[in-house]
Amino acid sequence: MACVIQVINPNTSQAMTDTIAGAARRAAAPGTEIAAVCPSQGVPSIEGHFDEAVATLGVLEQVRLGKAQGVDGHIIACFGDPGLLAARELARAPVVGIAEAAMHMATLVATRFSIITTLPRTLVIARHLLQRYGFEHHCAALHAIDLPVQALEDPHGMAQHKVREQCIQARRQDGCGAIVLGCGGMADLAQTLTRELDMPVIDGVSAAVKMVEALAGLGLSTSKHGDLDYPLDKPLTGAFSHLR
Amino acid sequence: MACVIQVINPNTSQAMTDTIAGAARRAAAPGTEIAAVCPSQGVPSIEGHFDEAVATLGVLEQVRLGKAQGVDGHIIACFGDPGLLAARELARAPVVGIAEAAMHMATLVATRFSIITTLPRTLVIARHLLQRYGFEHHCAALHAIDLPVQALEDPHGMAQHKVREQCIQARRQDGCGAIVLGCGGMADLAQTLTRELDMPVIDGVSAAVKMVEALAGLGLSTSKHGDLDYPLDKPLTGAFSHLR
Amino acid sequence: MACVIQVINPNTSQAMTDTIAGAARRAAAPGTEIAAVCPSQGVPSIEGHFDEAVATLGVLEQVRLGKAQGVDGHIIACFGDPGLLAARELARAPVVGIAEAAMHMATLVATRFSIITTLPRTLVIARHLLQRYGFEHHCAALHAIDLPVQALEDPHGMAQHKVREQCIQARRQDGCGAIVLGCGGMADLAQTLTRELDMPVIDGVSAAVKMVEALAGLGLSTSKHGDLDYPLDKPLTGAFSHLR
Amino acid sequence: MACVIQVINPNTSQAMTDTIAGAARRAAAPGTEIAAVCPSQGVPSIEGHFDEAVATLGVLEQVRLGKAQGVDGHIIACFGDPGLLAARELARAPVVGIAEAAMHMATLVATRFSIITTLPRTLVIARHLLQRYGFEHHCAALHAIDLPVQALEDPHGMAQHKVREQCIQARRQDGCGAIVLGCGGMADLAQTLTRELDMPVIDGVSAAVKMVEALAGLGLSTSKHGDLDYPLDKPLTGAFSHLR
Amino acid sequence: MACVIQVINPNTSQAMTDTIAGAARRAAAPGTEIAAVCPSQGVPSIEGHFDEAVATLGVLEQVRLGKAQGVDGHIIACFGDPGLLAARELARAPVVGIAEAAMHMATLVATRFSIITTLPRTLVIARHLLQRYGFEHHCAALHAIDLPVQALEDPHGMAQHKVREQCIQARRQDGCGAIVLGCGGMADLAQTLTRELDMPVIDGVSAAVKMVEALAGLGLSTSKHGDLDYPLDKPLTGAFSHLR
Amino acid sequence: MACVIQVINPNTSQAMTDTIAGAARRAAAPGTEIAAVCPSQGVPSIEGHFDEAVATLGVLEQVRLGKAQGVDGHIIACFGDPGLLAARELARAPVVGIAEAAMHMATLVATRFSIITTLPRTLVIARHLLQRYGFEHHCAALHAIDLPVQALEDPHGMAQHKVREQCIQARRQDGCGAIVLGCGGMADLAQTLTRELDMPVIDGVSAAVKMVEALAGLGLSTSKHGDLDYPLDKPLTGAFSHLR
C-alpha cells in the first residue's frame, strides 16, 4: 500500500527543504513517497515566535494543498512544531511535528535526553514544547550552539562542527542517554553522530516520517471528535480567503 | 501623562470590537486613551487553533501599526491570547493578553477561580494557557456554554443568559471564589454579574487595560534581553512582506 | 529488509497470546515477522503489582531468548508495561510497552484521551504510568469495566460489551478525543470500535508493533550510554541463574 | 477618584518604611495617596519563618486599622508576603503582596525571571511562593547576596553594590529576561538598575501599588464568597483581643 | 530512655486539648510522656488563615517554653500545621504537624487517601499542604462535613455522625485506600472508624506522636544547617518581646 | 508488646545483610526484635532495573515467609524499594522501603535534602522514587560516588571515604539541610556523619525500623481496601508456584 507523506518545511529556504527531503527519503519505508514542500512566501528561517507565527500560515496553506491531493500524513518540519494543533484541525490525516516525534522516540530508547538547538532565543520554544508534551522530566539539559539556522545550510561549516562538539559535551556531562537535534536543518547529522557517539542522536524529520507511517499503518487519523474537529465554517477574508 | 493603549480585537467583527472598546474605555483611567482596532482581514470569530493562527497575523500587523504610532501598550483581546509571544517580540511597549490579565487578577482576589467560555472546543485553549501561565492549581473548574462566540453579539440573547446561569452554578458548586469570563465578547457582562453574584466576575479586557496602565506607569516595557528580543531581521516575502 | 519483532505476552495465557499475536500480525508491515511468545511459567493474567512482579521475570527470560535469536525489537504486551526498564537494560534492540505505545500514539491524534481498563485495582498502575511517561495532562479520565482480564478471553462475552459501553460513555462525557484500551486482551476490539465511535480507539499491541518498526527503521536501538546500559556482570544464583 | 493605598512594612524599621514609602509614592498615580505604616511592635527585619510569623500579627493589626480608615487597598511590603491570605480574610479591599506583584509583572514582560534576595535562608521562602503562585517555570534562578536585610538601610553600602553585581551576573548567565528584587529594602534600586542593565528590574513595592490601583480601578475587591470570607466571629483573647 | 513530647493544641479550647491529649497518650509508647498544652491566649478554634496566624504565635510561645523544659519533640496539633517552619527554626528537637504526620503515614499503607475536614473554608488549607508536602498525587479527594470545629467538642453530637457518614461514602466512591481525618478534634474517632470501615482511618495526633518518637529514637533533630537555623538574634518588641 | 520486624536485604550478600541488621538493631526500640534475612537466590548487589526485577522475587518470597511467621512489619532494605507495592499486596502488616523511610524523615527535619548514592546508573531509580513519592521539590541534588555497592562491604575502604567527601561537598554547595544515604550498605555511616557534619545524615534502614514501629504502634496495617488488596488467587506455575 503506497503512502504519501507531505513533509512541510515551514520556512522558505529551498536548501533546507532539500536537506529535510533527503533525510525524510532516507527514513521512508519502501512504499512511502515523500512530497517535500515549503511555502512560497514567509520567512527564510525560524528563530523565534514571530517567525513561527508567520510560518504557521504557510504550513496551513500547505496542509490544505496536501489534503486536497489526498496525502496520507503531514509533517511539520521545524523544531518548534509551528501550527501543529491548527494543522490538526485542518487535516484528517495524521499531522506530526518533528520536535514531538524526536522527543517521543527519545523517551523510548533512553530515560533522559538532551536537546541541542541553534540560537539561545529558541530555547524557550523547546522548553514550552517539553511542558506541553509532558517530557520535562525526560529532558536532562538544553543547549544552544549560538549560530543561526541558516549557518547549517553550509554542509561543512562551523555549525555542524559546533553541533558535534555540543553533542560530545552533552554525552559527557548531562547524564543523558540520547540527544535530540533541535532543528530541521540538522537532519542529515543524526546518523553520523549516532555512530560516532555510540548513543542515539535523533533527528525529528526521520522520526516524524516513521511516526506518520506508523499512524497511517494503524489506520489512525486525527480525531474529529472534540477540539481537533475541522475549523468551523466561516468566511475568511483578504489574504486568508484561500485557506478555506 | 497621557497613555495610549491599543486594544486589538483579533477577529474582524466590528460589533465585537465595539463591545471590547466600550469595556476598555469604561476601565481606562482618566489619562488613558483607548485605540480599539481589528484586522481588516482574517476570521470573524475565534473558536479553535486554526482561527487563532489566522488571527495571529492580524494581531501582528496591528501591533506593527500601533508601534509605528507610538502607543504605550498593546492588548490582545481574545481569550486565547493568540500571538502573545510573537507580539511581544515585535513590540517594545508592554503586550498583555486578556486571558492572562483576567487570570492574574483573579488569583489576587480569590484562592481559586472558574472559567466560563463559549464552545467546548475552546476549553483546550484555556487549559493550555493555565498550564503555560502557571495557574492550573488556581482553577477550580472550566465550563462552556456551548454557544458560538457570535451568539454574544446579540446583547440580549440566549448567550448572555447562559453565561449568567453558568456563573450561578459555578458559584454554588465549584468551590471557587471568583469567575473569569472566557471570551472578549463577554466583556460587558462582568460588572453586572459581579454585583448580582456578590463575588468577583472578571472580564479580561478591562483587566488588561489596568495591567497595561500598571506596566506603563512603572516604566516597564517588554524585555529585549533574551528570547523576546525583536525578530531577527530577515526578508519576509509575499503576503507577509509588509510585516517588517 | 525483514524485521523480526518479538511480542511478549507477560502472562501465561495461550488464548491471550493468540489474541495479541493476531492483533500484532494485522498491524505488521509486509516485511515484519511477529514472534509471539509467553513465559512457560508465571501468572495466567496480570491484575496488580504482585502479578506484574512475577510476570516481569518471564518477560526478562523471553527478552534474553529473543536477543539470542537476534530479533529486531521486543514488545511487552501487558498494559502495565511490566519490566520495561529492566528489559531495556537487557536488550540492545528497542523495547516498547503497549501502554506507552498507545499513550504516545493517542497524544498524536487527540489533545486528550481516556483509558479503559479491566479491574479497578489496575487503575493505579495506569495512573503511575501516566505520571512516569509524562502524560497526566493528556488523560481526560480513567475507567474500569470491573471484570477480570480473563473475562476478555471469551470473544463474545460480557467484557467486550462493557468495554464498548464504557467507550461510548467516555466519548459522550469525558471531553476526550481518543480512547486507549488498557489491556492486551482488548487488542482485537480497537478497529471495530474506532469505526463505530468514529474516533480513534487505540490498542497498544498494534501501536507497539508500529513503534518498534519505526525505531528499527530509523536504526535506533536502546541507548547503552548511561542508565540503560547492560546489567553489570554478576553471578545470578538459583532460579535466576539462567537469566545471564 | 482618590484612592488611598495602605502600604504596610511588616517590620518595625522606620528607615525601611521610609524607603518603601518613597518607592510607593514614586509609583503612585496622581490620584493615589500612599499611607505607609509599620507595626509598633514586632521584628526590625524579616529573614526567616519565625520573623514572618511575628510580623504577620503586625500586618493583621495594620490591615484592621486601615480597614477602619476605609483605605482602598492594602500592600504587604515584605518579599515573603507574610500573612497574605489571613489579611485577605480580614480585608474587603484588595490585598497584594510585593512578591506576588513583582512576579506577576515579571511574567508579563519576560518569559523567565531571576530573583535576587538577601540572606540564603530566605531563598526557601521565595521557592515556596513560586510554587504557591504557580511561577516555578517562570523562574530562571534564585540568588542571595548573603547580607542581612538591614545592610540595605545604608543607601550607599556594600549591599546595594552586591545587588548590582548579582544582577549583572544573572543577566549574563541565567537566561532570564527580567530580574525581581527580592526584598522591600531594595525598592529604590529598581529604576536605576533597569536603565543600567537595559532590562526590566522589578521592585515589588511599586509593582504592588500599580496592582492595587488596577484592582481598585476595576472595582474588584477580595472575594468574600468561599475561603477568603471574613474570619468567623469568635472571641480572641489576651494580646490578640484587639484584632477583632 | 524516657521521651517527653510536647503536644501543642494551637487553639485555646481546653476540651479539645483534652481530646488531643487522650489520643496522644493512647498512642504513646511506654517510655513516652505526653505534655499537652494550649496557648493561654488566642483563638478557641482554627478555621481559616486568620485564625492560623493568631494561633501561630501561641504555638511559638509554647515551643519556646517546651524547649526551655527540654522536651524531646513538639507536635502542632491542628490540621493546618500552623507555624510549622517557624517552630522548626525555634526548636532544636523535632517538630511535627499532625497534617503532615497523617499524610505521611497514609502514603505508607495506601496508594491514595481521602481527607475529611470540618468547614469548607478549611479545604484550601489542606490543598496547600498537599502541594507543599508533595502529596497531591496521593490524595483521592477532599471532603468537608460543613460543621465548625467546635461541633466536635460534643463527643456524641452530629459532627461525629457526619464524619462517619462521609468516611463511608469516601470508601465507596473515592477510590481511596485510607482516610485522613482533617481536624485535631477528630482524634478519638480514628480507631473505631478503622475497625468499622476495615481500612486505615488515620488521626494526625497519634500519627505525630509516633513520628516524633521515631525521630527521637533515631537521634534526629531539626537541621540547624541552612534555612531552619535558629531565628537571627534581633530585638523583638512589645507583645512579642517574650518570644526570644 | 513485642514487635517483630522482618528486615529484608533484597540482595544475596551476607556481609550487607549483616551491616543492615546491625543498623536495624541499633535503631530498634527495646521491645522490637529484628529478623534480618536475604533471599537464598538472586543478585549479590542491586545496581539497576534488571537487578531490581530479579531481587523483587526474593523480596516477595521473604515477605511470604515473614507473613507465615507472623511478623509485625516488613522492611525492604535496598534504596530502590524494589517490589514495594507488590509486597504491600502480599502482606497485611506494614511494608516500608528504606528509600521512602529516609525521604519522609528528611522532609521532617529539613526543607530540602540531598541524596548520595553509589553508581551513576542508580540515580534514575532515585529520581523515579522522588517523583512517585512526591518529594521532587524537597530534593536539592543527587550525587553518585561512582563506586559499586559492593565497595561498601569493605568497612574501611575508599567507598566510605568518598561518601564522606560527597556529604561534605553537598553540605557546602547544595543548599540542603539534610542528607539521605542512598544505599543500604551505607547504613552504618549515618550516625558518625551526622555528628561530624552537624546536620542530619539519614540512613533508610534505621528510618524504616522506626517507621514500622510507628505504624505497628498505631495499629495501622496495609490497606486491603482497593488496589493493595491481596493478589487475586490464581495458579502460579513453575519456579513461582511457591509464592502463593
Image: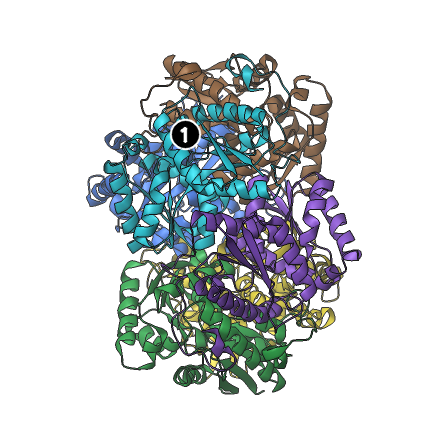
Chain colours: A green, B purple, C yellow, D cyan, E brown, F blue
Q: Secondary structure at mark 1?
A: helix
Q: Position of residue C234 (x, y in %)?
A: 31, 56
**Would residue F94 be visible to someone looking at this image?**
no
Relative to residue F215, is residue C137 depicted above or below? below
Q: Position of residue C143 (x, y in %)?
A: 67, 54
Q: Position of residue C70 (x, y in %)?
A: 41, 75
**Would residue B78 be visible to someone looking at this image?**
yes
Task: List the residue tagged with mark 1.
Answer: D49
Relative to residue B237, is residue D111 depicted above or below? above
Q: Around disc 1, counting alpha carbons within 10 Å, would you say few (fewer than 14), some (14 to 19), or many (20 or more)?
A: many
Front position in the image: A223 or D76: D76
Picture quarter with the C terminus of chain B? bottom left
**Residue B106 figure quarter:** top right
Chain that bears disc 1: D
Front position in the image: E175 or C230: E175
> Which kind of residue does numbered mark 1 sit on?
His
Front position in the image: D48 or C133: D48
Q: Residue at x 52, y 45 (%)?
A: F85
**Residue F92 figure quarter:** top right
Relative to residue B183, is residue C93 depicted above or below? below
Q: Position of residue B211 (x, y in %)?
A: 53, 49
